[in-house]
Image (cartoon, rainbow, N blue to C red):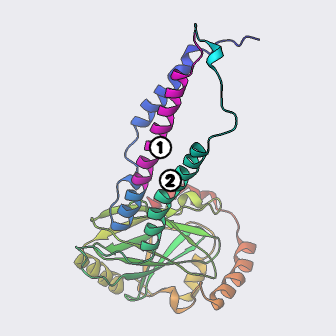
Amino acid sequence: MKFKPLPKWLGLLPLSLIIFLSGCGQMTVLNPKGPVAQSQYDLIMYSLWFMLGIIVVVFGLFLYMVVKYRDRPGRDESDYDPNLHGNTMIEIVWTVIPLIIIVLLSVPTVTTLFDLEEPPVTENQTTEEPLVIHATTADWKWFFSYPEQGIETVNYLHIPTDRPIEFKLTSADAMTALWIPALGGQKYNMAGMMTKLYLQADEEGVYDGRNSNFNGEGFAAQTFKVHAESEDNFNAWVEDIKNESPELTMDQYNELLKPGLTEKMSFSSTHLEYVQHHSNEGMGYTVERFRELYGEKLHLDADEVEHQETFD
């Protein structure tokens, strides 16, 4: 049975893909702006180069075997006398080599993961004491509470550069994940519990942040901007929020918890005074609110979807 030759244009597909991808900008995760992101970048590049070396060796041996032992005219088949009973040395080698590969990949990975569970320490830090920010999610918005400063923002974030940030992550309803690609990897926000994520910005700028765990129709718009600035500018911004923004009342917070999108907001107090969603009481509050909120409103309104650009 003969197969028809494939069309010649199919051979152009890999080249077309390379040309297409070459037009894309540099991936944010490959352009780290802080020590946590740098550690993860170093681990990614180490793993990629290590695995690339394995691929080169394997395909090199494969090519060598194909060329050396190919069937060709004039070959004397009487010389072919394979040993079908195995080779102890070869079997030891192809068992030991994968074990070495696993060790060389797993040790740096595990070491980096353990290091990231502690605040980063760098030479340029203004202080090793992390700034604590409670990051709470509710469909489909972000609440950033600064307990030490006594302020709270919705859908945007300010942080000082050269200082560790300790995010305390929780959720008022569905499970989400906080991710700021330029500063580090993501971690989950879950109702009734708290997880911690340490990040730090070494360069001033505005970075993109988002929810990286799908949680319904408002998922695409659950984004925020991170404004990294000097310590002095950060302190001035805090004072402006304290002096110019209203306090966050419990009734207003309950209204904000309703499923939907909202614009950027700021308050001179935090919702932590009323409820902490990671506690047992907070979990009970979440269950109670679920019954009320999802009975009242489950879907986004059309006009909310049209205003997704307010999160850019």
Residue 86 figure quarter: top right
- Asked whether residue 185 appears in the rendered view, the answer is no
Where's residue 121, x and y in %?
31, 76
Secondary structure predominantly adopted by residues drawn in magenta: helix
Say whether marks 2 and 1 touch (CB < 8 Å): yes
Residue matched to label 2: 101
Please give the name of the residue rendered at 34% of the width and 62% of the height, measured from the top-left corner: 206
Answer with mark 2 or mark 1, whichever residue precedes in sequence: 1
Q: How many marks?
A: 2
Q: Is residue 8 above or below residue 143?
A: above
Residue matched to label 1: 54
Q: Is residue 58 above or below residue 6?
A: below
- Asked whether residue 286 appears in the rendered view, the answer is yes
Is 69 in the magenta? yes
Amino acid type at mark 1: Ile
Q: Is residue 100 above or below residue 294?
A: above
Q: Which residues are magenta?
A: 44-72
Q: CA distance from mark 2 to mark 1?
A: 9 Å
Amino acid type at mark 2: Ile
Please give the name of the residue rendered at 61% of the width and 12% of the height, measured from the top-left corner: 76
Where's residue 18, x and y in %?
44, 32
Whether residue 53 sits left or right of residue 211 in the image: it is: left
Please give the name of the residue rendered at 35% of the width and 61% of the height, measured from the top-left corner: 38
Q: Residues within 10 Å of mark 2 (few under 14, many from 20)?
A: few
